[in-house]
């Protein structure tokens, strides 16, 4: 069976490396995007099984990206886990309006992230 | 990592054990500080509600600033950030922003209170960490006061939290002690024989400038009947002042606030990097050193938004790589950059560099 594919979106290369390491160790294929537009494009061309998305992103912003993904019939049902350094109610509320599956705050616990991924794929 | 640690990490909105470790006190002292914080917060929240209703922007800003400081003291970062938003809303005279931040503040405060109200959430804390803290904090504070009563009182306060105080009887002795030893914090009484507090302050600052040392936080000890002293202290550049008669809570709050910074930058953090990502760490740390250069360049151009953005990223990635204190320093840096506070931002970049230069991990 082909490994499930996870799209990781964050403009911090060091953070993407870290996420990729933890996620790929669990047998998933990881693809990465570093801004909102790239994320939307890859979400359509690569059909990931799940997306790990940051909020503070160039070119589109995390919330803009989220909105776009939820408005497209091709990407509307992809589970999305937010991993962001924004730990305030306002941003959480905004993200929840787009039905994100999970909201995690950086610094994150890799074990917790993996357990959340298991819940959806 | 044990299973117990995992449970703690995933359910706690705050890391009380690291707060406890940082303040160097015992569990009852932490409990005392938490009670004080909750009481103070509730009172200020009520005032803030009124200030927003009355659109009293000066008061909104002032209360936001005060809540930000007290939340930072206990590392309640979400509350610190939200309080910062209140302060900014006051500055910008933006009532909508203030109202939104007030909602977040209420939510975060409730979350914290709910957590603290559950006894089992505090049970895992060690009853006393004074033994450990004593050795690491010993002699880090200097107090100059010519009154024996005051000396005893200050000693008693600091002994209760396991910190030993070096005492000087006047400004001249304080300067002599300062030349022999590095302190994390200095208390200077203003009215002293031989050399008064103002003269000692200027002497210490000139030594620091001459030797290119970072400025030691200096707190003035002033009499309530000398309002002009307080004004002079702040204009000279004292970090803060405490009015006599000494209030244990105030003194401990100040010690807590300044020793925190000292601890945050200390390289003594017990860093355990996950085996599976160890090979990523050298590059990660190298890139953070590049960040220091970038932030210094940005500071030269007063480009605070760029510093804020870099700090925000480090706040997220540092702890994720296992460097918890790095995230804490970055959080403070992000806030000072957000406030366009040049001096504080400069100091925090310096602290961050110091942390990186001394980092050790397994």
Image (cartoon, coloured by chain):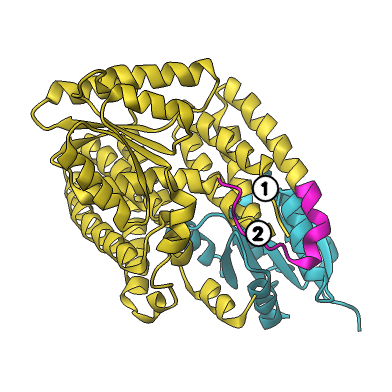
Mark sitting on residue B271: 2
Residue nearest the observer in this picture, B234 or B341: B234
* Image position of B48 with respect to B291: above or below: below
In the rendered image of this protein, does residue B290 appear above or below residue A95? above
Colour yellow maps to chain: B
The answer for which chain carries disc 1 is B
Estimate the x, y position of residue B199 in percent, counting from the top left: 30, 16
Q: Are marks 1 and 2 in contact (CB under 8 Å)?
A: yes
Report crowding for label 2: few under 14, some 14 to 19, many 20 or more residues within 10 A (C-alpha).
some
Range covered by the magenta-colored residues: B266-284
Can residue B68 be seen in this snapshot?
no
Res. B178 visible in picture? yes
Q: Which residue is mark 1?
A: B359
- Residue at 80% in and 47% down: B283
Residue occupying image coordinates x 37% and y 73%: B115
> Is B232 in front, or is B38?
B232
Q: Is residue A81 left or right of residue B193?
A: right
Helix, strand or loop at mark 1: loop
Identify the image quadrant of residue B280.
Answer: bottom right
- Whether residue B55 sits left or right of residue A62 in the image: it is left
Determine if the magenta segment contains residue A21.
no
Residue at the spot 42% in from the left edge and 28% down from the top edge: B178
Secondary structure under the numbered disc 2 in the rendered image: loop
């Amino acid at each position: 069976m082909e490994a499930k594919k996870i799209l990781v979106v964050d403009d911090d290369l060091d953070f993407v490396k870290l996420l990729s390491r933890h996620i790929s160790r669990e047998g998933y294929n990881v693809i990465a995007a570093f801004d909102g537009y790239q994320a939307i494009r890859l979400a359509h061309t690569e059909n990931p099984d799940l997306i790990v998305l940051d909020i503070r992103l160039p070119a589109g912003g995390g919330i803009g990206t989220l909105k776009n993904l939820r408005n497209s019939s091709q990407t509307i049902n992809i589970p999305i886990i937010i991993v962001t350094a924004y730990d305030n109610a306002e941003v959480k509320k905004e993200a929840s309006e787009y039905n994100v599956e999970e909201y995690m705050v950086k610094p994150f616990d890799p074990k917790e992230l993996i357990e959340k991924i298991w819940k959806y794929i | 990592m044990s299973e117990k640690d995992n449970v703690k990490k995933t359910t706690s909105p705050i890391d009380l054990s690291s707060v406890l470790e940082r303040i160097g006190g015992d569990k009852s002292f932490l409990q005392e500080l938490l009670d004080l914080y909750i009481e103070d917060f509730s009172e200020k929240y009520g005032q803030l509600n009124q200030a927003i209703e009355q659109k009293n922007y000066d008061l909104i800003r002032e209360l936001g600033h005060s809540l930000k400081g007290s939340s930072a003291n206990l590392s309640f970062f979400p509350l610190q950030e939200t309080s910062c938003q209140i302060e900014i809303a006051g500055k910008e005279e933006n009532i909508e922003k203030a109202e939104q931040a007030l909602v977040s503040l209420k939510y975060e405060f409730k979350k914290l209170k709910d957590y603290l109200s559950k006894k089992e959430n505090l049970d895992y804390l060690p009853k006393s960490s004074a033994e450990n803290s004593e050795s690491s904090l010993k002699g880090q504070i200097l107090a100059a006061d010519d009154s024996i009563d005051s000396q005893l009182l200050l000693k008693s306060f600091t002994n209760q939290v396991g910190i030993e105080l070096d005492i000087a009887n006047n400004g001249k002795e304080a300067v002599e002690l300062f030349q022999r030893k590095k302190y994390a914090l200095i208390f200077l009484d203003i009215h002293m024989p031989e050399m008064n507090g103002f003269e000692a302050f200027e002497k210490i600052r000139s030594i620091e400038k001459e030797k290119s040392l970072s400025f030691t936080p200096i707190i003035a000890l002033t009499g309530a009947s000398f309002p002009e002293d307080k004004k002079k202290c702040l204009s000279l550049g004292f970090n803060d002042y405490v009015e006599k008669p000494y209030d244990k809570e105030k003194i401990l709050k100040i010690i807590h606030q300044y020793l925190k910074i000292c601890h945050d930058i200390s390289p003594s953090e017990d860093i355990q990097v996950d085996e599976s990502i160890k090979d990523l760490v050298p590059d990660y740390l190298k890139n953070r050193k590049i960040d220091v250069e970038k932030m210094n360049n940005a500071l030269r151009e007063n480009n605070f938004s760029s510093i804020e953005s870099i700090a925000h990223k480090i706040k997220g990635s540092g702890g994720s790589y296992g460097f918890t204190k790095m995230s804490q320093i970055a959080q403070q840096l992000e806030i000072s950059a957000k406030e366009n506070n040049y001096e504080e931002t400069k100091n925090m970049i310096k602290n961050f560099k110091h942390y990186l230069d001394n980092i050790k991990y397994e």
